Amino acid sequence: MVNTKKFIEKAIDEIKTAAGNEKVVMALSGGVDSSVCAALAARAVGDNLIPIYIDTGLMRKGETERIRTIFSDIRLDVVHAEDEFLGSLKGIVDPEAKRKAIGERFIRVFEREAKKNGAKCLLQGTIYPDRIESEGGIKSHHNVGGMPLHMEFSKVIEPIRDLYKDEVRDVAGALGLPKEIQHRMPFPGPGLAVRVLGEVTKEKVAVVREANWIVEDEIVEKYRPWQCFAALLGLGTGVKGDNRIHGWIVAVRAVNSRDAMTADPIDIPFAHLTRIGSRITADIPSVARVVYDITAKPPATIEYE
Ligand code: XMP
């Protein structure tokens, strides 16, 4: 466990030295990692920090409004890039290719925003497990292996690259960030795209977004999981009213973990699981089936792709 006070001083120094008098652009998603980076960088470079929120069209329900409310006291540019991201994902089925396409798109948006603001440095909230899994060839986290080799930035600064998630949460507490941010569940950079198996389309994202909303509503407060979410597995047969339908199969995942390197499914009472299933199929007409994922990590990962 790091000494948070020392870490904060060292990180601020490091950002100051790396940025010099240059402007620094960063994507603030509202998760704990990017919020900690923003708080450190604001202390290090002040007004030279340019935080942007990118609406990728792959974010959770209500996220853009939430971000505007939480960060109402800082100048946050909201960039609407939904069509761009969905366009880049068209026809892509392979999970790694999806991650790479998203990583590439993120960088292009950063470059554009940096140019607009005259920024030369990019700040990223990469944490230790992101690097391990990317370097170990397990998968390319969008902010590591998914980055294109050619970038128009003179510097990439990653101040929390050696921290585990629980350490990031401790730093968030020490920096005085709101509890809602400090304890928020992790959400992957590529967003809902890694929770839709196969090609990502606007329709599939809309279904998984709504299902995810229900899953969080039913599970977060009650079980305080490390992570819970919905994923869209594919199409299957179902019956709704008098008709057989070809409907979506939604998986519900809820796990506990210490550092995301291993995880265990949460023992949710069967009666509650069936209620969650009924709510999802009732609220989303195109869903025909709901399953609960009972797999640990390993052998499964937490996310589906
Ligand atoms: P997995 O699925 O590898 O996930 O067991 C471990 C933790 O990392 C999150 N995750 C990601 N975070 N970019 C991120 O920033 C990614 O590409 C990514 N993939 C997974 C996941 O939600 C879990 O908390």
Image (cartoon, rainbow, N blue to C red):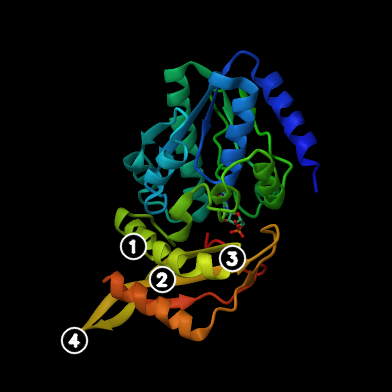
- Give whichever of discs 4 and 3 has the lower sequence position: 3
- Give whichever of discs 2 and 4 has the lower sequence position: 4
The amino acid at mark 1 is Val
The amino acid at mark 2 is Val
The amino acid at mark 4 is Asp
Q: Is residue 136 visible?
A: no
- Give whichever of discs 4 and 1 has the lower sequence position: 1
Mark 1 is surrounded, within 10 Å at the Cα level, by few (under 14), some (14 to 19) or many (20 or more) other residues, namely many
Determine which residue is flagged by label 3.
225
Residues at marks 2 and 4, CA–CA distance in whole angstroms? 22 Å
Q: Residue at x 38, y 62 (%)?
A: 208
Residues at marks 3 and 2, CA–CA distance in whole angstroms? 19 Å
Q: Residue at x 77, y 36 (%)?
A: 5
Residues at marks 1 and 3, CA–CA distance in whole angstroms? 22 Å
Determine which residue is flagged by label 1.
207
Asked if disc 1 and disc 2 are in contact, CB closer than 8 Å, the reply is yes
Determine which residue is flagged by label 4.
242
Taking 163 as reference, is 94 above or below it? below
